[in-house]
Image (cartoon, rainbow, N blue to C red):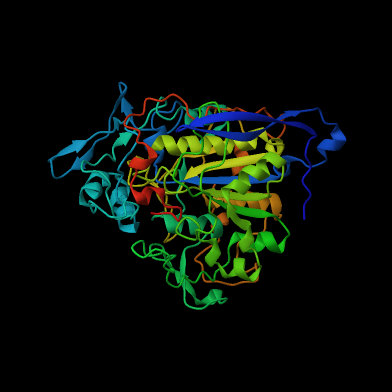
């Protein structure tokens, strides 16, 4: 196992009393201050190996243009004289709809399965968004169903501004924004999360037999859900994920990892002055669409189920300087930004996660990769390149937050979540890939995604020659121009589910 080298830190605790709904909650927030380290303390690691902790924070269902379409220097919404110059057909109204500023906190989005991705892209014309939203299912009991449109009037052409999501824009400005980050698969959330941890989405017929798996972009085995009409019911039999995932290589090489699951019904902090705090009602026992690892044969065979934990443990590990080498952090429905969940809830939750890392002793050796798992039906003007029968999908925002990230840099490389795995493999596995020809578990995946020639290299987003930059602590509840923010009790039950959605 590679041993992480940390600077010496002084640590003290600050007690913050939070008034929440008439209750006073006292949290202990770890605060740290650095003391200088000698060259011997810093060690001899150079370049990428200065990163000893990689954290992938995966949010839900936003296109690049819907969040960063007007970000300076980025490949954003085409403009003429300060106004959008593109217009997407609306066949019902016999007109077209231009991108427009939408300050509404709760958005509807549109359908976002494989057929919808194909139609939205429209052979490269990027003109199917309104038609797909109009044709989507309405009034769904489960609005996280990828076939649904979650608003009476489609809002897929709306986009948010800096004043709506100031913290996300601040991270882009202070660190690195990626404006050609594509969903790895042209489909919905479950395949995206499967690609995030394994570079593939498949359907298998036999446990512990990777050869029994077949490519399945839209319909891999779906984790079951309990019957909400029957309290205490047992979910039906789970899917078979027999192909190789990244945790297999990490475990084989004694590289620590954790997959942290958030569940709860409230935003992470109830007070603007709190820089970070864990969410309410944490529960790691939520295998599902956003948490597929419990169904991987490799995870079970290696006895790694315990690495799938509550996000409470992420906050604790960050405070103690005990983060694993690789972390994935996934939200509950309510803080996911997946329509109909509020944008503001997700931004607060992510800010709390980032603040927790920045306050901990691992900050100086950490890279946080923040992205959104698919486009959610929202407009984007860039046609994705085709790398194989699975993708790429549409553009999503991507941000690199690290003391070594280039400040104010916009990375125009072609990227996908495959680049995260490539970075992890280069950093911790000496460049070993999830490759059926070399990893000892041959499966019939169509290609080795990390080696696709068009894929960029995330090391371009870092300056490893610079001294680690200090944290940028942001308010958990910033002032925004978002409108119509609901109370947690006003959200539909599906928006508070801990086991994911589409």
Q: Position of residue 328 (x, y in %)?
A: 57, 50
Q: Quadrant of the N terminus?
A: bottom right
Is residue 215 positioned above or below 152 on the image? Answer: below
Is residue 74 positioned above or below 451 on the image? Answer: above
Residue at 28% across / 33% down in the picture? 99
Residue at 33% across / 54% down in the picture? 146
Is residue 403 positioned above or below 246 on the image? Answer: above
Q: Position of residue 448 (x, y in %)?
A: 55, 61
Left or right: 387, with 377 as reference point: right
Q: Position of residue 418 (x, y in %)?
A: 54, 52
Is residue 395 positioned above or below 245 on the image? Answer: above
Residue 402 visible in rendering? no
Left or right: 141, with 287 as reference point: left
Q: Position of residue 175 (x, y in %)?
A: 57, 31
Residue at 33% across / 63% down in the picture? 229
Q: Nearer the viewer, residue 220 or 499?
A: 499
Residue projecting furthest to the top: 81
Q: Quadrant of the C terminus?
A: bottom left
Residue projecting furthest to the front: 22
């Amino acid at each position: 196992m590679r041993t992480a080298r940390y600077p010496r830190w002084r640590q003290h605790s600050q007690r913050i009393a939070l008034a929440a709904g008439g209750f006073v909650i006292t949290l202990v927030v770890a605060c740290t201050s650095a003391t200088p380290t000698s060259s011997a303390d810093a060690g001899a690691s150079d370049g990428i190996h200065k990163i000893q902790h990689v954290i992938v924070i995966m949010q839900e269902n936003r296109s690049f243009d819907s969040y960063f379409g007007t970000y300076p220097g980025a490949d954003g919404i085409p403009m003429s004289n300060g106004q959008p110059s593109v217009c997407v057909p609306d066949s019902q109204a016999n007109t077209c709809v231009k991108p427009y500023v939408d300050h509404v906190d709760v958005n509807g989005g549109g359908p976002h399965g494989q057929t919808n991705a194909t139609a939205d892209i429209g052979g490269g014309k990027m003109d199917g968004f309104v038609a797909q939203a109009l044709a989507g299912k309405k009034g769904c009991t489960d609005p996280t169903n990828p076939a649904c449109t979650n608003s009476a009037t489609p809002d897929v052409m709306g986009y948010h501004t800096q004043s709506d999501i100031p913290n996300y824009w601040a991270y882009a400005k202070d660190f690195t924004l990626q404006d050609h980050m594509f969903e790895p698969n042209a489909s919905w959330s479950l395949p995206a999360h499967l690609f995030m941890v394994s570079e593939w989405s498949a359907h298998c017929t036999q446990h512990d037999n990777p050869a029994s798996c077949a490519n399945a972009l839209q319909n891999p085995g779906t984790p079951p859900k309990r019957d909400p009409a029957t309290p205490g019911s047992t979910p039906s039999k789970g899917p078979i994920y027999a192909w190789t995932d990244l945790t297999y290589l990490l475990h084989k090489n004694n590289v620590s990892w954790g997959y942290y699951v958030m569940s709860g019904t409230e935003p992470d902090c109830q007070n603007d002055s709190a820089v970070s705090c864990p969410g309410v009602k944490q529960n790691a026992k939520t295998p599902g669409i956003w948490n597929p690892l419990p169904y991987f044969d490799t995870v079970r065979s290696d006895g790694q189920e315990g690495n799938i934990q509550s996000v409470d443990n992420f906050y604790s590990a960050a405070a103690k300087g005990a983060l694993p080498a690789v972390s994935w952090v996934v939200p509950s429905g309510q803080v996911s930004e997946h329509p109909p969940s509020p944008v503001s809830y997700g931004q607060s939750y992510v800010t709390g996660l980032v603040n927790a890392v920045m306050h901990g002793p691992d900050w100086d050796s950490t890279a946080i990769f923040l992205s959104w798992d698919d486009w959610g039906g929202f407009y984007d003007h860039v046609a994705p390149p085709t790398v194989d029968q699975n993708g790429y999908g549409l553009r999503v925002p991507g941000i690199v937050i690290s003391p070594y990230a280039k400040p104010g840099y916009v990375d125009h490389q072609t990227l996908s979540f495959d680049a995260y795995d490539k970075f992890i493999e280069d950093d911790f596995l000496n460049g070993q890939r999830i490759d059926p020809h070399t990893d000892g578990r041959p499966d019939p995946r169509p290609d080795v995604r990390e080696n696709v020639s068009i894929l960029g290299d995330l090391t371009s987003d870092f300056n490893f020659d610079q001294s680690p930059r200090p944290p940028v602590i942001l308010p958990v509840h910033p002032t925004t121009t978002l409108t119509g923010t609901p109370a947690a009790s006003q959200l539909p039950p599906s928006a508070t589910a801990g086991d994911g959605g589409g």
